[in-house]
Image: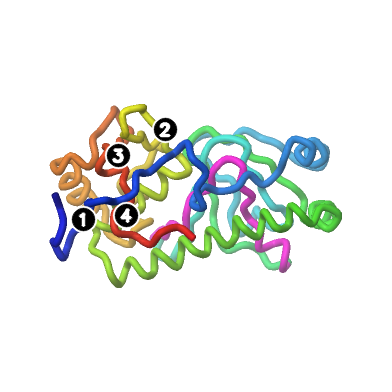
Amino acid sequence: MLVNHPDRFSLSAAPTLDIEAPRAGVPPHAFDAEALSELRPMCLIREVAARSPVFGPSTGSGSVYFLEDGAVRLFRLAEDGHETSLGYVAPGEVFGMPILLRREPDERFASAVCRSVVWRIPRDPFRRWLASRPCFAVVLGAQLERRLRRLEDRVDDLAARDVRQRVLRALHDLALAFGRPNGNGSVTLDLPLTQAELASLVGSTRQTVNASLRTLLTERILQRDGRRLVLLSNGAAEPAVRAES
């Protein structure tokens, strides 16, 4: 039990993470089969190798992107080379959407975390298509709202939670999109996440995140399965975080 410890999550009576049930935290799929068949002729579809770039500020302008399969990390790069993770894109999501509202280049970078299939959709044809399919504009708005809410939560966490708490919350959120249930209450995070990337996501250092992971492993909240992390039945509970609205 970790109840009543001021620096720990309360795991008592926390709701279980149900990967197979619809959740507000799970990204809605942007397009149905009919929409994909209409968009395919206007797209450049390519397979991107793991750890390879999808776009950058000088290469992504003029297009939006749809992730068919895999996982993509969005991040910013400071002048000193420091990376700040902005989040992860799951299959069925559209990204690079700021270009729909303005023509200035997107200042973010996108990189494939694993082998990924990415559709590159030219801005103007997509805008015309979207104008004739307003129902899909609502879905894209929901995806944008979800990402904004995640960023707001991360800002709150930086002020209110220690690194251990932020790591556990980040793993829980990633499991909503990339988790694979094991049938025994545990969930495997099917995402090849490095400690440096996790540190960038939670606003800490790799060394501190490594120490937090060791603590969670010792507490039997996490375990390792090769290079993957597994949230055990008590770690797969959403601990003392705001309920999804």
Spatial distance from mark 4 to mark 1, Cα to Cα? Answer: 8 Å
Q: Amino acid at mark 3?
A: Leu
| Closer to us: 19 or 79 | 19
- Residue 177 lies, in percent from the top left, at 48, 43
Residue range (magenta): 82-102
Q: Earlier in the sequence, mark 2 or mark 4?
A: 2
**Occupied quadrant, residue 60:** bottom right
Spatial distance from mark 3 to mark 2, Cα to Cα? Answer: 10 Å
Frontmost of labels 4 and 3 is 3
Report the residue marked by disc 2: 180
* Label 1: how many Cα within 10 Å (few below 14, some 14–19, many 20+): some
Q: Is residue 182 left or right of residue 19?
A: left
**Occupied quadrant, residue 32:** top right
Q: Amino acid at mark 4?
A: Ala
Residues tagged 4 and 1 counted as in contact (Cβ below 8 A): yes
Report the residue marked by disc 4: 199
Q: How is the image coloured?
A: rainbow
Q: Earlier in the sequence, mark 3 or mark 1?
A: 1
Q: Amino acid at mark 1?
A: Thr
Residue 208's disc number: 1
Q: Is residue 221 left or right of residue 237?
A: left
| Closer to us: 225 or 118 | 225
Above or below for 165 versus 174: below
Q: Earlier in the sequence, mark 4 or mark 1?
A: 4
Frontmost of labels 3 and 1 is 3
Helix, strand or loop for disc 3? strand
The verdict on residue 25 being magenta is: no
Residue 231's disc number: 3
The residue located at (45%, 58%) in the rendering is 244
